[in-house]
Amino acid sequence: MKKAQWHRIFSPVIPPAKLKARILARVSELERAHARVRAGIFGLIAAASAVLLVPLAQYTFAQFYASGFASYLSLLISDQGLVITYWREFVLSLVESLPSIALLMLLPVAAALVWALRGALRSVRIAYA
Amino acid sequence: MVKSDEELLQEYAQGRREAFSELVERHLTGVYSFLLRFVGDAQDAQDISQETFVKAWRAAATYNAKKSSFKTWLLRVARNAAVDHLRRRRNISFSEFEGEHEHLIAETVADPGELPEELLAKAEDAQTVMRALHELPAKYREVLLLYYTNELTFEELGAMLGEPQNTIKSRHRRALIALREALGRDAPKQAK
């Protein structure tokens, strides 16, 4: 009872009607400002990744042909009977001829490009909503 | 089903922006009530409420649900913003928040007891309570407000203010006694 008495005395006060809107407007303003900065950073990362991706992709394609991977792969179209008969050897040859170093360089850059584009798009949506 | 504060924060982090609006809706009354009575000015309370939610928004990623509830964390942000505000206005000194060995006194202070009828009637008037509250040191005010208005437990208060529970309990008792005295002192002033 004693505690209830004090609780009644200190009962919550209803805030002014416009306060919530004012707070949300300020947060939204800051969200947009942050989103503009993030969009810029993501944009730079995306541009850098795209620039790097072109020579890496060219190098990787060249390696696919140089390693014989493309020749093995063409057997899928030219001689399917051989591929079905010796499928284990075929798969092994494909794996062995993969240009792994080129792929190890290309895939992270491609992933960074996708990640940065996704981030940039999200940020732009918030910044200019 | 009502979502927890932590779920709303998670949804906000995942991009559902309305989740933050729901958090503001849920906690604004508690934060504003505390601030209004703590700083004693409606405009300042509104400004600090805004500052509190902006700070909470900025620091949302650092909030750790294992350490404290969102409500306690948010009230800590509000309390710190209010203390900074009062210090800027030189309404309180650093010494008002310095620790003391209150737990030693806890056993010796009188029981605050129930308010007599005439004091209770006066306490029903918000302005009178506000005046009486502002005669108390800030550290008494915050304990009373966080305990009664925001319904924090002594344990939560201790964790929030970084002090032992016994110190908080003792401070609470002393604050109630001081408030009773302040309400009593206010009586002749009002009669005049």
Image: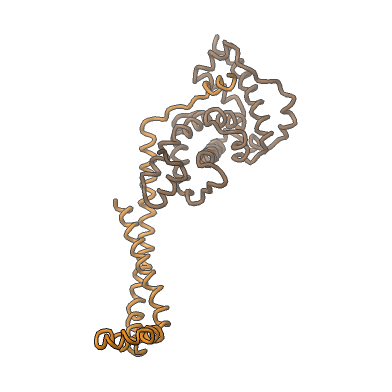
Residue ID at (51%, 39%) = B71
Give the farthest residue toward the left.
A78
> Which chain does the brown colour mark?
B
User: At which x and y percent is residue B61?
Assistant: 48, 51
Identity of the residue drawn at 40% across and 48% down? B12
Q: Is residue B141 left or right of residue A77?
A: right
Q: Is residue A127 visible?
A: yes
Furthest residue toward front:
A85
**Of residues A74 and A21, which is closer to you in this image?**
A74
Count numbered badges in the picture: 0
Q: Is residue B102 left or right of residue A18?
A: right
**Quadrant including the C terminus of chain B:** top right
Q: Position of residue B158 (x, y in %)?
A: 63, 38
Determine which quarter of the picture holds residue B90. top right
Asked if one can make out residue A74 in the rendered structure from this viewpoint, the answer is no
Residue displayed at 60% across by 31% down: B143
Chain coloured orange in this rendering = A
Q: Quadrant of the N terminus of chain B?
A: top left
Query: Is residue B134 shown left or right of residue A94?
Result: right
